[in-house]
Image (spheres, coloured by chain):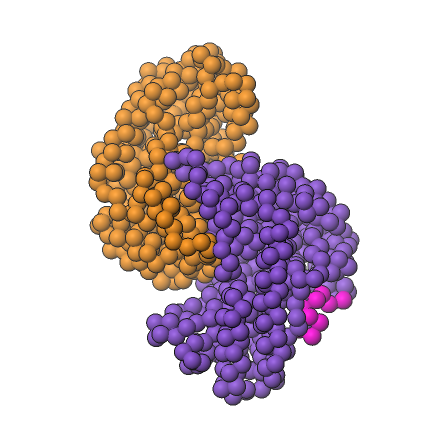
Chain colours: A purple, B orange
Amino acid sequence: MEISRRGAQVPASPIRRLVPYAEAAKKGGATVYHTNIGQPDLPTPDGFWAALSVYPSRVLAYGHSAGSAEFREGLAGYYRRCGYDVAAEDVTVTTGGSEAILFAMLATCDPGDEVLVFEPFYTNYHSFALSAGVFLVPVTCRAEDGYHLPPPQEIEVRVGPRTRAILACSPNNPTGTVLSRAEMESLAGLCRRRRLFFLSDEVYREFVYGEKHTGVLELGLGHQAVMLDSISKRFSACGARIGCAVTKNPALQKAFLHLGQARLSPPTLEQAAALPLLELGPDYYGRIQKEYRARRDVVVDALERIPGVVCRRPAGAFYVMARLPVANAEDFAIWLLQSFRLRGATVMVAPGDGFYATPGRGKDEIRIAYVLEKSALARAMECLAEGLAAYGGVPSR
Amino acid sequence: MEISRRGAQVPASPIRRLVPYAEAAKKGGATVYHTNIGQPDLPTPDGFWAALSVYPSRVLAYGHSAGSAEFREGLAGYYRRCGYDVAAEDVTVTTGGSEAILFAMLATCDPGDEVLVFEPFYTNYHSFALSAGVFLVPVTCRAEDGYHLPPPQEIEVRVGPRTRAILACSPNNPTGTVLSRAEMESLAGLCRRRRLFFLSDEVYREFVYGEKHTGVLELGLGHQAVMLDSISKRFSACGARIGCAVTKNPALQKAFLHLGQARLSPPTLEQAAALPLLELGPDYYGRIQKEYRARRDVVVDALERIPGVVCRRPAGAFYVMARLPVANAEDFAIWLLQSFRLRGATVMVAPGDGFYATPGRGKDEIRIAYVLEKSALARAMECLAEGLAAYGGVPSR
């Protein structure tokens, strides 16, 4: 009894596929520093828990398929304070940013259509594309360029007759790179010339350290622009499963609504609980930026001191990609969990190849999420450095 | 800038597409009895709210992609008490029963494959099939047969080279029909002969009034059986977005896990909150069965008294399909909301055609969800009866 080809092809998440090794290490008594997953350790702001505790109904009912009116209005208000012209009806609340990505692919592409992505990219784009029957066409960004975009002609040459959209993520997961205004405008220009949708994953919009985030809604793209967002990282509320898709395109809004009606509603409680968080302002964002910036520096300072490691200091999100002096970063990551201990501890990292679509790329790279407090990150980087030394430094090329 | 064909084709939910008319009626001061949507009015059991209030972490983190270990074990325990051999690893927790249906289609079918469904069927199967690039092949069940299955040969003749699965729902939404053991065994036999997966939507398993529910896991189908379930109706917790897919097939389990990893995790809080509800036993289920059975009788007794209405007394779920003496039930449903008032009130029903895949079918049918208290249902049925009389009783055929 064979399952479907795509069912067999959906990849294990590179962020999570080593979890059994980590669980075994912990069973064996080891401390494991989890830098593999972008799960912030900061508390979800008090306002969330306070609103949750006074949820007014004893019937946990379906909400509106596009999200509650109050929450959509709250999100629109947040985006207006960001300087964007967004009304509540432009916002579709989704079950996490994940569903926003899937809905955007379904509503812009038919099976067999193509979406341009910049590798390394958020690994789960793979699985959503496979679910939607869409092909991802990768344009490679290089570690040496700080994972910024390649020259425009290298991008445009990948646009074909079935290309329907560009999917970009800035600040970037997994690289931390923040696209400049010029880069974003160049992509918008390409979308105008070749009539493509610009699907812009801006989940890390508030996580910028010194540089300025440029959003897709600033580029005058009108009906071609779709912003994909999530409250997961911003409010340390990953388990809430609340995201959104924002567009001025009425046909896309309608498609999102109908796709939303099929799954009835996003979680009800979390919309009510997260509503007050939408009022958080510069004080809150400044505080988390300061914390993550300091963490980034702990990690990147440590990486720069490890012989043979290549990495740039990224300007946003809470990730850094690094090239290691090993032939196979996944083997090394497994070895760290299975065989390496520094004072009873080890570190878990995400192997890099899962963030690429081009076969063979990223095999000597890893992604580190700096979502632990600074002292834990320092110890984690110590494990990485000592681990690399102990592993023998097999040259990667 | 055209959106995708499927994006434009995803249908508006027939359960929800008349919502703007209902909102307008309410703005105009009318009371609207909502029998259009299967949103139970009973309170979510106290145990849910109690567990929610003592959620132990201040960081709302991602959970396991297949659901928390405790919740999966809790579900497995519930199914074992139902008499099924289910282990925690057979259970994938999904974001509502909706996601379980989508995952099951993705993991059993490639784009262009076919799934047999029995119409009228749960309308959102349409949208999930469209998302997954799967074709639904309808086998029609008739009001006169109480929407039971047609003879086996009428079913088997619809199985073709691309048919991968049968998707059945018992107790049924929208008809309330409970398939007999003989019917379920006949479908299992067909799955064996033609090597099909049996995807069994058992969301209403506890809502049976006199007859016995037969589950797909009782039929000895092994790796061909997938049960799809949800806590939404059972615990009046529709807004929680917690469901599951249960199978003994390791390849399907793996595909579900990987699809689950792509969207990271189902909602975290609601799994913790719903955990104690899995221990509820015959006392709880007996009480809700008694309540819904009484409600069904209020609705069906009233329908039977309306001239020209055809309906059977269904044995399960909380729905009844009825054929009305009108040419177009949707026009009538809109008219009820726009133009008809009985002592300041009217009733909202779901037009029947959205529950069919065969064009033209169901145009004179409606679905009524008996999810209001008995006195409200009695008034709703009064509105329907008086509305039909006032509408003029245009003969439907």
Q: Residue at x 70, y 51 (%)?
A: A216
- Asked whether A145 falls inside the magenta stretch, the response is yes
| Left or right, residue A301 beside residue A392 | right
Work out which quarter of the rendered image holds the N terminus of chain A and state it.
bottom left
Q: Residue at x 30, y 51 (%)?
A: B75
**Residue A31: percent from the left, percent from the top?**
41, 73
**Residue A262: percent from the left, percent from the top?**
49, 41
- Asked whether A357 falls inside the magenta stretch, the response is no
Any part of residue A149 in sight: yes
Q: Which of the two residues, A51 or A392, is positioned nearer the viewer here?
A: A51
Any part of residue B222 in sight: no
Q: Residue at x 55, y 56 (%)?
A: A233
**Range of the magenta residues?**
A143-151
**Residue B373: percent from the left, percent from the top?**
34, 25
Height in image: B130 above or below B106? above
Numbered marks: total:
0
Height in image: A376 above or below A228? below
Q: Residue at x 55, y 66 (%)?
A: A370
| Left or right, residue B213 beside residue B354 | left
What is the quadrant of residue B142 in the picture? top left
**Residue B292: percent from the left, percent from the top?**
30, 30
| Left or right, residue A12 beside residue A117 | left
Work out which quarter of the rendered image holds the C terminus of chain A and state it.
bottom right
What is the quadrant of residue B283 in the picture? top left
Q: Which of the two residues, B274 or B199, is positioned nearer the viewer here?
A: B274
Secondary structure that dominates the magenta span? loop
